[in-house]
Image: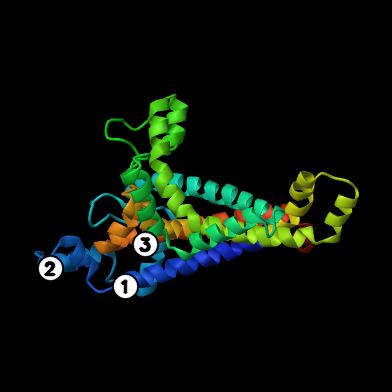
Amino acid sequence: MTRFLFSRLVSGVIVVIGVSVLMFLLARVVPGDPARLALGPEASAEQVEAMRQQMGFDRPIAEQYIRFMKGALNFDFGRSLYTDNPVSQDVAATFPATLELVIFAGVAMTVIGGAMGIASAHFKDRWPDNAARILSLLAVALPNFVWALFLMLLLSFWLGLLPLTGRLSESLAAPPAVTGLYTIDALIAGQWQVFRDALAHIVLPAVALSLPGLAQISRLTRTNMVDSYDRPFVEFARAYGLAESSIALKWALRPAIIPTLMILGMQIVALLGNAFIVETIFHWPGMAKYGVNAIMRKDLNAVIAVVMLISVFFVLINMIIDTIVSFIDPKIRLKAS
């Protein structure tokens, strides 16, 4: 088991190093001089050259990369060309909003998608199964931004049930920061009005973000559950007189959940990728929206920090999923040992 986890850790480190190399090279080949961008068009040639020396662009490429990696390991990506703040400070301020959105979307995607898949397999070829399959196909067929616009029109403009944009109403102050997640911080502080308002604000972007992944998990869970129902041990459980609910949750679900868990990590990382669109549409003040603004303004330091953080998040999520699967699936434990 230790060898298995160590191999996953090594693979993750290689992925992060690969991303760092790509981002380092991108910063060197992108059109425009970073020193000129930092100083503005009115800076003299002498000022630009001095800035290039300060940024280390006059040094050998290998030395520049080592300096870049040292800064990344210390979470130091320089200053933002737009906000003039340290990039690490900007990312630390915006990351909790994105994390909260991804957590809510991930929970909805996993729980609702899994439940739909289980119910669909249980009622195979009957109307609940057909309805779930049609909804899943519809959710996959339409991209996130279409769902975002549709939900905004339906639930906010037409029905007025949910707020449209932002994390919190302007009339309310943010709860005292503990985790940076407004819903959790409001619960800790006992501010129930803030909690309800923050929860109402997160519903629309979280649902829009979760729908494609929810559909994928629902379809995969259904397929694997149907396959499990045809296996001999399920027939034995039925012959033994066990209740159908017990067969579904204790016998059929366990082998069916392993393939679903194996793609869950990719789906959670996909939530981060899709958050760039969803946060922009809903004006959600998260790291993904910060990254979009950085791309539009050619703020390379900020772009590099956002991409590097996403790559680390990708590695951590996949390591967690691999660890869970290794405990559930005895074949992986035997291979690891």
- The quarter holding residue 40 reads bottom left
Q: Is residue 315 visible?
A: no
Name the mark on residue 46: 2
Residue drawn at x 29%, y 66% is: 56
Task: Name the side, left or right, on which 96 lies relative to 8.
Answer: left
Q: State the quadrant of the N terminus.
A: bottom right
Name the mark on residue 28: 1
- The amino acid sitting under disc 2 is Glu
- The amino acid sitting under disc 3 is Ile
Q: Position of residue 291 (x, y in %)?
A: 33, 57
**Of residues 265 and 282, the one drawn nearer to the viewer in this rendering:** 282
Q: Position of residue 31 (x, y in %)?
A: 25, 74
CA neighbours of label 1 inside 10 A, class few (<14), some (14 to 19), many (20+) = some
Residue drawn at x 43%, y 32% is: 185
- The quarter holding residue 131 reads bottom right
Q: Distance of mark 1 from mark 3, alpha carbons?
A: 12 Å
Q: Position of residue 164 (x, y in %)?
A: 32, 44
Task: Name the side, left or right, on which 1 lies relative to 198.
Answer: right
